[in-house]
Image (cartoon, rainbow, N blue to C red):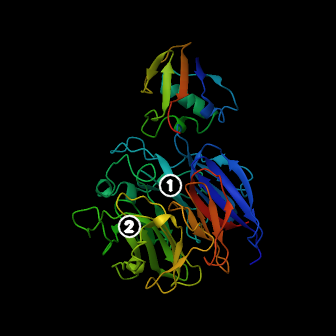
Amino acid sequence: MTEAIQLLVGTRKGAWRLRSSAARQAWRVEGPLFLGQIINHFVVDPRDPKAMLMAASTGHLGPTILRSTDGGDTWVEARQPPAFPSGEPHGRSVHHTFWLEPGHASEPGVWWAGASPPSLFRSVDEGDTWESVKGLNEHPKAMDWFPPLDEGTPDGPMIAGIVIDPRDARHMYLATPMAGVLETTDQGESWRPLNQNVRCDYLPDPYPEIGQDAHQIALAPTNPDRIWQQNHCGIYRLDRPAERWDRIGDAMPREVGDIGFSIVPHPRCADTAWVFPMDGTEVWPRVSPDGRPAVYRTRDGGLSWERQDKGFPREQGWFTVKRQAMCGDGRDPVGLYLGTTSGELWMSDDEGESFRQIAAHLPEIYSVNAAPL
Amino acid sequence: MVSVLIPSQLTAYTEGATRVPAAGQTVDAVLRDLDARFPGLRFRVVDEQNRVRRHMRIFVGREETRTVGRSLADGDELLIFGALSGG
């Protein structure tokens, strides 16, 4: 692989880009873009690498989508950002878009957006105009699955992730904070929960049909029947067509636990994935356990985990890494990247064997995505 | 016509102008008139249910309104502010 690489970084105070040659050794920090805007997600379209979208809002202004069709040189605002229909019965309005997902490879120009309050929108014109996905937003159980709440992380409950089966554009999964994982096989017209054996420590019935908090889900690229999930209550794996998740986080060291936000699958090995554990004890500090940051890797589908912490602070390193702020780059060896809420960017160019800091002093990092340049 | 004070948060839409004239007999009509000339501006002030966004404030003269149906008279001054908030 000889292509140069870029990292797209969304923060609470704007967006930044880091660029490097294919060697991934020296990184140039560029920005800010849209200083002061809250950028929840900043994503390149793999079907058209010149096309980029950002999910933006500010403390004052309503949400919008920013678009570029020239690789980020110029930006325009979406003509019709994600919004509920005027007069919809529950009085909902989009607070912010949280997740932007390029559509299936067979559908150029299609994008999906997950928003807060939990809701789904679709664009067929490269993100310029967006329509409510009625199958979810007007689902008879929508208000049971997503009861109105002002609070939640971050800044209210949202659709926390969208995953599309690379073999079938109609088959999708959502990660949600109150209904766990939802699945559709008709491209969003109907949905059903997929949460068997996923625990809710915070409900009277610890294994309900819904109520789970799916922090992030990802398909194994070489085996899209394998779903990895980092949940509020543990790390899970599901091999379809099975319906029952296995809590593979039980194999994590007990003193570290299996709580976190992100999970990153290996691009070429379906048994390998990385997580970034955070402290989920007592009052849920959500920082590196014991102040010692580490990534954990499994290479056997979650039967066992190994600690990878070379290069990270040995002590007093209280990292928080949000769910969109850890990613891989698909290269060989895989590059791993994570951004902290304290504005530091760390990377590994050897599949987690060692890490180094490549940027610091940025605002609170919300999302990190790697893409060819 | 109504004179509209544009807050700093919205001057990117108005090419830097902090005061612009607009037509309309209600706050809603004025915002729609502004949006026709400065696309996208209205949605960042008012949500899809026609509610003034939580951290935006609209005054007609010295009187605040949270209702975009508030009527306006020729010569009124409409002031849009970003509320004190955030960090």
Q: Which residue sits at x=45%, y=77%? A: A227
Chain letter of disc 2 in the image: A
Chain letter of disc 1 in the image: A
Which mark's residue is nearer the viewer, 1 or 2?
1
**Amino acid type, label 1:** Phe
Q: Secondary structure at mark 1?
A: strand
Q: Which mark is residue A182?
A: 2
Q: Secondary structure at mark 2?
A: strand
Q: Is residue A267 above or below residue A160?
A: below
Nearest the camera: B11 or A78?
B11
**Amino acid type, label 2:** Leu
Q: Which mark is residue A98?
A: 1
Residue B57, how many percent across, how many down? 49, 27
Q: State which quarter of the image contains the C terminus of chain A.
A: bottom right
Nearest the camera: B55 or B4?
B55
**Label 1, label 2: how far apart the Cα atoms are:** 17 Å
How many numbered circles does the render carry? 2
Residue at the farthest left position: A204
10 Å crowding of disc 1: few (<14), some (14-19), many (20+): many
